[in-house]
Amino acid sequence: MLAPGSKSSQIAGGSTLAAIGISIAVGCALISGLVVSAIIDKVLLLRGGDIGLLQHPGFFAIIAGDAALVLILSITSKSLNSINSDIPNSNSRYSKRALRAAVDSHWNGGSSLFFRILVFSSLAGLMALINQSIKLGSAQHYYGHDTFDSINHTFSYISARIVLFISWCIVIPIYISQAVTYFRFIDTIFKRMHKAGALSFFVEHRDRNGGFAFIGNINILFNVGLLIVIIESIILAYTHRVVSIEIIVSIFTFGLMFVAFSYISTFRILSILGAIEDSMKIENFKKIRSSGAEIDSYHLALNFGVRFSLYTATTERILLSMRAAAFIPTVYKIYVYTSV
């Protein structure tokens, strides 16, 4: 569906401006639907501890978050289209062949990894939506207060179901599927290329990471999306002033995914980079020692001018900040609400 180099991927990632326009248009339509429904049901503002539409930041966070996820999908898909030319390689013919085979197994067909994850995550989202919809049949019992989208307010109830269906059953599942498939794909393709000796590290590459920084950049973007979903869950907990088991499961699940994408997904590539670093430095040292040549600019760049990493100094700091942002508020909020 969003495979690197495929037509569908090119459509999805071909225009970031188009993605922004579509996201804004759909977001405005959903907000308008919620507002009109709330006006009809007279639930824009509620009193006595009940929560009206304008008192429910959770729904606005979901709509804004979905728009951000669509934008990130567009940017990452666009980057994936050029992955064949971005991968540092010494054998472009083998690289193209390996890439084509990996794309077929990861994205194309009903048995592909992308499709299987999409079906599973969509069903999980649908189950969460059904469970939440049942709860809203008796919002007072479950939340301790009425809400604008409870079954008592028909139009708002329906409008809210549409918003949540788009988010939980379409946008987030596609995002999760693309992110997981991408990192499994990267892991596979780099393993094959390294084994075949087709992977290179370009000391003079402008990113000062040998040409590997694009992977770290995409990793950062995917983690931004997961952080957005975690923040949405926290805002929902804050809105209802209660941490339900669903919210805890959501925060825990996406927190684990954040860890997986932040650490585990790049573990093999970092190991490969470590092996390449050792090999290149030892070879360069032997060359200088055997020939008695003076230390040249290549030697200095190899040992002091490049980073055998997926991250530049800046993106590494950003990633560390995101890790803190993902877990510190989450743990604090769960502690506060469960200790009351």
Image (cartoon, rainbow, N blue to C red):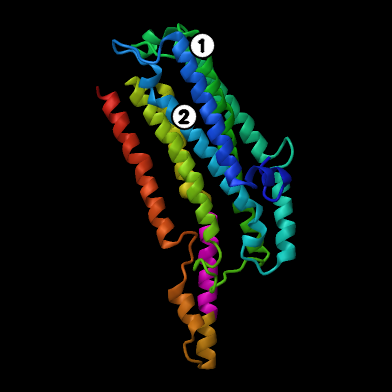
Please tell me which residue is depicted at 61% across the width and 68% down the height of the picture: 200
Residue indicated by mark 1: 155
* Closer to viewer: mark 2 or mark 1: 1
Foreground of the two, 143 or 308:
143
Q: Can I make out residue 164 in this image?
A: no
Q: Which mark is residue 105?
A: none
For disc 2, the marked residue is 62
Q: Quadrant of the C terminus?
A: top left
Helix or strand or loop: what does disc 1 sit on? Answer: helix
How far across and down, in percent of the image, does residue 57 sit? 38, 26
Decide: is 4 above or below 172.
Answer: below
Query: In the image, which residues are magenta?
Result: 267-283
Q: Is residue 274 magenta?
A: yes
Which badge, 2 or 1, is on the more N-terminal residue?
2
Q: Is residue 4 left or right of residue 230?
A: right
Q: Distance from label 2 to label 1 (Cα)?
A: 19 Å
Badge 1 crowding class, 10 Å Cα cut-off, few under 14, some 14 to 19, many 20 or more, is many
The disc labelled 2 sits on which kind of residue?
Ile
Mark 2: which secondary structure? helix
Q: Is residue 271 visible?
A: yes
Q: Which of these two is toward me, 331 or 76?
A: 76
What is the three-letter code of the residue carrying label 1?
A: Phe
- Which secondary structure type mostly characterizes the magenta part of the structure? helix
Give the image quarter of residue 325. Answer: top left
Residue at 67 percent of width and 49 percent of height: 4
